Amino acid sequence: MAYKIVSSQCTGCSACEPECPNVAIREKNGTFVIDPAKCTECLGHFDEPQCVAVCPVDDTCVIDKAYPRYQAA
Amino acid sequence: MEPTAYVGVQEIKPLQQLLEKVAEHKGCGTSSGTSGGSGKSSCGSSAGPADMSPEVWEKVKNHPCYSEEAHHHYARMHVAVAPACNIQCNYCNRKYDCANESRPGVVSEKLTPEQASKKVLAVASAIPQMTVLGIAGPGDPLANPEKTFKTFELISKTAPDIKLCLSTNGLTLPDHVETIKSFNVDHVTITINMVDPEVGQHIYPWIYYQNKRWKGIDAARILSERQLLGLEMLTAAGILCKVNSVMIPGINDQHLVEVNRAVKSRGAFLHNIMPLISAPEHGTVFGLNGQRGPSAQELKALQDACEGEMNMMRHCRQCRADAVGLLGEDRSAEFTTEKIDAMEVEYDAATRQAYQELVEEQRQAKVAAKQAELAGLAGADSDIKLLIAVATKGEGKVNEHFGHASEFQVYELSTTGAKFVGHRRVDLYCQGGYGEEDTLPTVIRAINDCHAVFVAKIGGCPRDELKAAGIEPVDRYAYEFIEQSAIAYFRDYLAKVASGEIVHQDRGDADIRQGAYIAAA
Ligand code: SF4
Ligand code: SF4
Ligand code: SF4
């Protein structure tokens, strides 16, 4: 399961972008999106998903159930 | 005199408590008459060059935000290059920008460092008295270090005469002190609302630090430690530090006296206590909780209390993160990205220099006029203190029509002279050339603690209503210097009291208008 950004809530503040250890987050039309192929849910890097921890708008960076749980190799 | 019809400030006053705490802190009585003064001569000394070392004064005298007197003459601008933030404050709703340190309701235009530096040059060319560039958000400039420092780098290359400053919540400040120094940033503002995590937990729901979200007491403790460490490091490095505090009644209002002491002892040179902005429509936690902001009297009492300890800043407009122009004036609409992109910008340092010399002459004239008038007050002996409101467009003159004023500057008059104590924002009374019935009561509420209002001109109807509310409209000093006129007025006033023509009476409290400064469209 990768994380995804609820774009209707994202303020485009850019706090998450530099925190992602996998450079999975980029700007798109004023809000930010996560590339599910790159997101590792921060496993192996940090205790918490960084985008969730830093995002000032609650419930904006959420689990995307469309993807299977990421397994650190 | 029956002003009650307009008095809008509710009976919610821990004011007496505050005054007592304050009296204790200063070791002497306060202006409101709490007795028990120990007669220490240092008590209640007023802010001004006398309280500052010459080096500090040299640095701040042309800085509109740091020197109250300079703000009549010099302009500043902010560029919004820093949208990200690493803490959450209960007075901020990031969805609508930060309500307290930026404009509420509308998202500022975010700029890249390149766009920002072009904007700075464009503004500096159009407004030659623009001497200061600040980065103040909308998030935290030091949560966006690349963008912030890239902007400083570009500007210091093309316009080295512009002073750089930055405003931060302080969380990552210790990590950046070296860089701040290397860019020759000589002024930094830290927002410090508490030095006690017990108090802090009610202001900050969480912070993001070392890759983790911290909550409650832990969050407040880390934030406070980092803020104070950053402050100490900056002052040790010789960088001027101002501290901003948001006064939140019932949460940190009494505690700010302690904050004042803590930051003063760590070398902060100026303390700016600002009223909380919290309207439900801003969607902040405080706004939705019904947390109120302070009244004008409460704010002034706290500022007065801390003043004996250090310089207090009273002319803060809580500007938006992209404000442009003289304080109290907002010209940001003239400099949108679209307009800047289309501009051919040429930076002409010589013209700016010449203009600033002219400004300096004007300023000297004003000081001389005030000194002369003050001499006339020498020997007068009276305890009377009163507030007056002034409609002004700048240059230190009474030069605004009552109906066109979007704010009034408030001066306190006493036998020691006229002292600036704050400004009150109001809705324009006269929109489109006629007086709006509904706005007059709000204007009166905003200056209800004043005995008189100085204007360049005023219509018959507001004149009568002001009088009915007990505020004397005064237009006989139109286009003259504010302080000189105020002292002259005060001399007359004392003479009339002495002759029995008028009886001196105290005025009531006043409202502080909610919302960051927004120019009337
Ligand atoms: S969960 Fe971690 S890896 Fe995934 S997008 Fe967020 S910060 Fe990047
Ligand atoms: S931190 Fe949250 S609000 Fe800010 S850009 Fe990322 S997802 Fe959007
Ligand atoms: S530091 Fe300023 S921008 Fe950041 S959350 Fe607090 S008030 Fe808002």
Image (cartoon, rainbow, N blue to C red):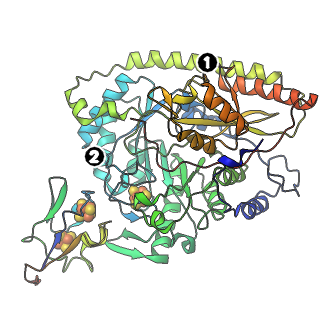
B195 w.r.t. B117: above or below: below
Tell me residue B314's x, y (percent).
Answer: 61, 43
Work out whether disc 1 and disc 2 sit on a shared chain: yes
- Which label number is shown at residue B238? none
Q: Mark 2 — residue?
A: B110
Report whether B436 appears left or right of A28: right
Tell me residue B22's x, y (percent).
Answer: 74, 59
Query: Residue drawn 49% across and 58% down?
Result: B278
- Read off the chain for label 2: B
B331 w.r.t. B513: above or below: above
Q: Is residue B493 visible?
A: yes
Q: Quadrant of the C terminus of chain B?
A: top left
- Read off the chain for label 1: B
- The local crowd at label 1, few if under 14, some if 14 to 19, many if 20 or more residues have their Cα within 10 Å, is some
Residue B498, quarter of the rendered image: top right
- The local crowd at label 2, few if under 14, some if 14 to 19, many if 20 or more residues have their Cα within 10 Å, is many
Q: Nearer the viewer, residue B196 or B417?
A: B417
Q: Quadrant of the N terminus of chain B?
A: top right
Task: Provide the secondary structure element on which disc 2 rests.
Answer: loop
Tell me residue B245's x, y (percent).
Answer: 55, 56
Query: Residue drawn 56% across and 53% down?
Result: B275
Tell me residue B157's x, y (percent).
Answer: 31, 32
